[in-house]
Image: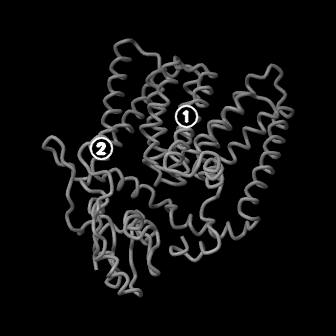
């Protein structure tokens, strides 16, 4: 990482290290291997599904709605790979479950888990805020003796104790170098956070890429359909469904405002989850219910098309491409500036990047985090990138597309790990 930025020479503070310590603890117990790491991810998935099921069951959701959780989760969030998001979601579910128990010391543990969820993946704050406030309000409304000051004093004391505990743990993980962390973290965030005026352009760009206007658009259309049905039958909608839809929607808005680039991660997952659960829970006539359920199944299948095509038609394993020419050029031109994407960084350089390397995703002065046209290439810069970047960058050489049953998919590369060098 020190080859990427001097800030990483003696520390790596662009992300809170909670995930690193959690994974390290796991590996110390179960060994360091690909199987162990994948099992860690699976356990995070299972924990999220189990505790989310417990929460929904407590508030009166049906068994069918609960069974939909692992299906939606594994087919939506699994694309994050080995990132920290799975762990953050597990901590999030555990923390919210503790809050539903409505006891002082359980509030403390709930806030602790929510704190480490936030430190595992900062974007989770978008969902922590509305769900936490919603659960606390529901708990208060169910109190037999509603003493506002006494109740919220209990909540505030628990929150403050959890804050001190989690913040102390956090300081320990960064060797108490808070100001170093803050400088690094805010610098890294400035490269990734989108200015408010660029949120809509980025959103429309993602939707216009490949078939996303159909694939993503279908789940957004389903969400809007559910919203319309809820508003149309507002008086007949169960209270628990109203709360769930409202709180999740608030989280989606906060997510888009804070970090719209997580569109295909958190946003699409929660949109799919809220839509599926609404379809299951909403009281409708049998025919209308059947039609809405059929629409949901169609949308779900459409959303899985890229994964199915990639699995069947693309070479999803790294090719044995000869990188000798690329490495030779780099070694002979050490003072050249190189723009390198994540694929080339992994398979060509094994993350030991050249001295003057620039990470593709952190290029500046664009609305979408990476060059969207070859015209943006600096004459003094060499691009070493996956050929598949031609799907989102105009002017790049054509690349082989995935083909299945005589149909060519222009947005899905046949060899996603093929590397090209543009001088």
| Quadrant where the N terminus is found in the figure | bottom right
Quadrant of the rendered structure where residue 385 is? bottom left
Asked which quadrant contains residue 30, the reply is top right
- In the displayed structure, would residue 295 be above or below residue 406? above
- Which residue occupies the foreground of this view, 129 or 354? 354
Q: Are marks 1 and 2 in contact (CB under 8 Å)?
A: no
In the rendered image of this protein, does residue 335 appear above or below residue 225? below
Which residue is the extreme one toward the front?
Answer: 31
Q: Position of residue 255 (x, y in %)?
A: 53, 48
SS assignment at label 1: helix
Residue occupied by mark 2: 311
Of the pair 176 and 321, the residue shown nearer to us: 321
Q: Is residue 178 left or right of residue 201?
A: right
Q: Residue 296: x and y, percent? A: 36, 28
How crowded is the residue under tag 2: few (<14 C-alpha within 10 Å), some, or many (20+)? few
Task: Say which of 415 and 359 sits in front.
Answer: 415
Q: Is residue 119 visible?
A: no
Between the C-alphas of marks 1 and 2, the distance is 24 Å
Could you say where residue 380 lies in the image, as x and y percent from the top left? 34, 85
Residue 251 showing in the rendered view: yes
First reached walking from the N terminus: tag 1 or tag 2: 1
Which residue sits at x=51%, y=54%? 259
Q: Which residue is rendered at x = 76% and y = 65% of the image?
A: 176
Determine whether the residue tagged by mark 2 lies in a helix, strand or loop: helix
**Residue located beneath label 1 in the image:** 46
> Looking at the picture, how far across and down is residue 350, in whole percent?
43, 67
Q: Which mark is residue 3?
A: none
Residue 141 horizontal side relative to residue 344, left or right: right
Left or right: residue 370 versus residue 85 is: left
């Amino acid at each position: 990482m020190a080859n990427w930025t001097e800030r990483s020479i003696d520390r790596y503070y662009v992300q809170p290290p909670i995930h690193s310590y959690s994974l390290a603890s796991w590996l110390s117990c179960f060994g360091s291997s690909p199987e162990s790491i994948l099992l860690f991810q699976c356990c995070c998935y299972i924990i999220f599904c189990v505790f989310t099921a417990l929460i929904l069951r407590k508030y009166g959701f049906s068994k069918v709605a609960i069974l939909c959780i692992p299906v939606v989760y594994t087919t939506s969030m699994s694309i994050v790979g080995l990132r920290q998001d799975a762990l953050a979601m597990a901590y999030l579910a555990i923390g919210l479950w503790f809050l539903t128990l409505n006891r002082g010391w359980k509030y403390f543990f709930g806030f602790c888990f929510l704190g480490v969820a936030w430190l595992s993946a900062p974007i989770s704050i978008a969902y922590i805020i509305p769900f936490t406030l919603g659960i606390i309000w529901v708990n208060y409304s169910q109190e037999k003796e509603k003493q506002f000051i006494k109740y919220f004093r209990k909540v505030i004391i628990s929150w403050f104790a959890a804050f001190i505990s989690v913040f102390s743990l956090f300081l320990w993980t960064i060797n108490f170098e808070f100001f170093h962390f803050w400088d690094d973290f805010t610098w890294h965030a400035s490269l990734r956070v989108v200015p408010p005026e660029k949120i809509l352009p980025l959103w429309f760009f993602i939707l216009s890429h490949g078939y996303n206007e159909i694939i993503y658009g279908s789940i957004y259309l389903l969400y809007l359909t559910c919203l319309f049905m809820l508003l149309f039958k507002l008086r007949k909608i169960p209270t628990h469904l109203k709360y769930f839809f409202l709180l999740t929607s608030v989280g989606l808005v906060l997510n888009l405002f804070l970090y719209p680039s997580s569109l295909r991660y958190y946003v699409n997952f929660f949109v799919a989850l809220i839509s599926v659960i609404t379809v299951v829970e909403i009281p409708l006539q049998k025919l209308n219910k059947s039609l809405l359920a059929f629409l949901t199944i169609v949308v779900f299948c459409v959303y899985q098309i890229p994964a199915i095509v990639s699995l069947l038609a693309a070479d999803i394993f790294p090719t044995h491409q000869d990188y000798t020419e690329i490495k030779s050029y780099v070694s002979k031109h050490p003072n050249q500036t190189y723009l390198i994407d994540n694929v080339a960084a992994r398979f060509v350089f094994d993350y030991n990047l050249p001295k003057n390397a620039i990470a593709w995703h952190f290029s500046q002065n664009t609305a979408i985090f990476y060059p969207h046209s070859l015209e943006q290439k600096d004459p003094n810069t060499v691009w070493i990138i996956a050929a598949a970047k031609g799907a989102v960058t105009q002017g790049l050489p054509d690349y082989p597309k995935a083909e299945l049953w005589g149909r060519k998919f222009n947005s899905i590369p046949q060899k996603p790990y093929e590397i090209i060098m543009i001088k």
